[in-house]
Image (cartoon, helix red, strand yellow):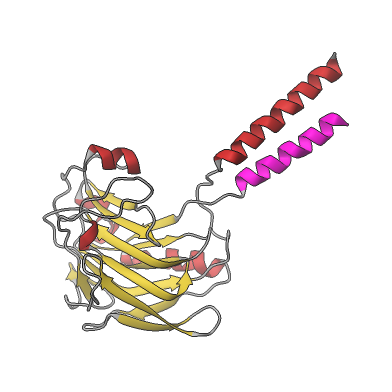
Amino acid sequence: MIFKKLAAVASLALFAAGSSVAAPVVYNLALPNISTFDNVITATGASVTTAQVTSGASTFSYVDLNGHAATVTVTRTDTGALATADNGVYSNNGRALSGDAWDISPQRGLGGGVGGKPDIDGFTSGLTFTFSSPVNAFGFEIGDWATCCTGNTRSVDVQNAYSVPAAGSGLWIAFDGGAATLPANALTDTDNPGFALENSYTNFIGAIDSSGTFSKITFFGDGFGEFLVAGGTLRFASVAIGSVGGTELPEPGSIALVGLALAGVVAARRRKNA
């Protein structure tokens, strides 16, 4: 009986550990494969909202999950000023973005360090997207990434703190002012999926974090010296919490609970055998 009770405690502890926050699922796709991102969202029963980027616009309207009017506003991360699409439609080797774009060519500028992590050079040259109604899936199109500058070296502090490669032209994303992650890093031009598929320096970057919702997203690149644009069509959604899996990250307390429970199970078994 004691063994069964302790086994139940262990099962409960394992459930607690497994039900913790999942890491965001990120997508780096060639433009013809954007449906991969959309299909993950629709498979949860949610729908994809789109907003085509147009020159001169910095605020885009949409209808949120509850049927209410909402907006997403785009600002320059370094100044907080409204960011109007200023680069027209980017096209390369017959493949064009689906709308206009912002020039976000990487420039030196520190920021983005959260929770004691070091700042990331290039943070301030990006864009910040602010949603009036929270979402948890977001993506857009990229132009001219990985054409050069893949040999840039990141500081040792950044490498260690964010578990990222030493070199590369990276595309970074951060949610609600949290620590940035690196969903894409190019060491050669073929690391751009658009180039690998059809010799076009175009791609789509998206992320889904169904552990919660977010209202603000910052995106930037650190391939200093390269031209980089973002825009096309913004895609976003609100999927059910826990509906899209990532790497489960058990909390330390849950791990400790599992260990204590299993230790009790072993002790009970030994007493029973004795």
Give left or right: position of 91 versus 8: left
Q: Residue 219: in sight, yes or no?
A: yes
**Which residue is farthest right?**
1
Magenta: main secondary structure equals helix
Picture residue at 80% right of the left edge, 22% below the top: 269
* Region rendered in magenta: 1-18
Residue 249 placement (x, y as % from top left): 52, 44
Residues 17 and 93: in front is 17
- Tell me which corner region of the image, top left, top right, bottom left or bottom right, holds residue 82: bottom left
Q: Residue 163: in sight, yes or no?
A: no
Image quarter (top left, top right, bottom left or bottom right) of the N terminus: top right
Q: Is residue 241 above or below residue 265?
A: below
Image quarter (top left, top right, bottom left or bottom right) of the C terminus: top right
* Image mark count: 0
**Which residue is farthest left?**
225
Q: Is residue 108 above or below residue 71?
A: above
Picture residue at 37% right of the left edge, 72% below the top: 130
Picture residue at 21% right of the left edge, 59% below the top: 145
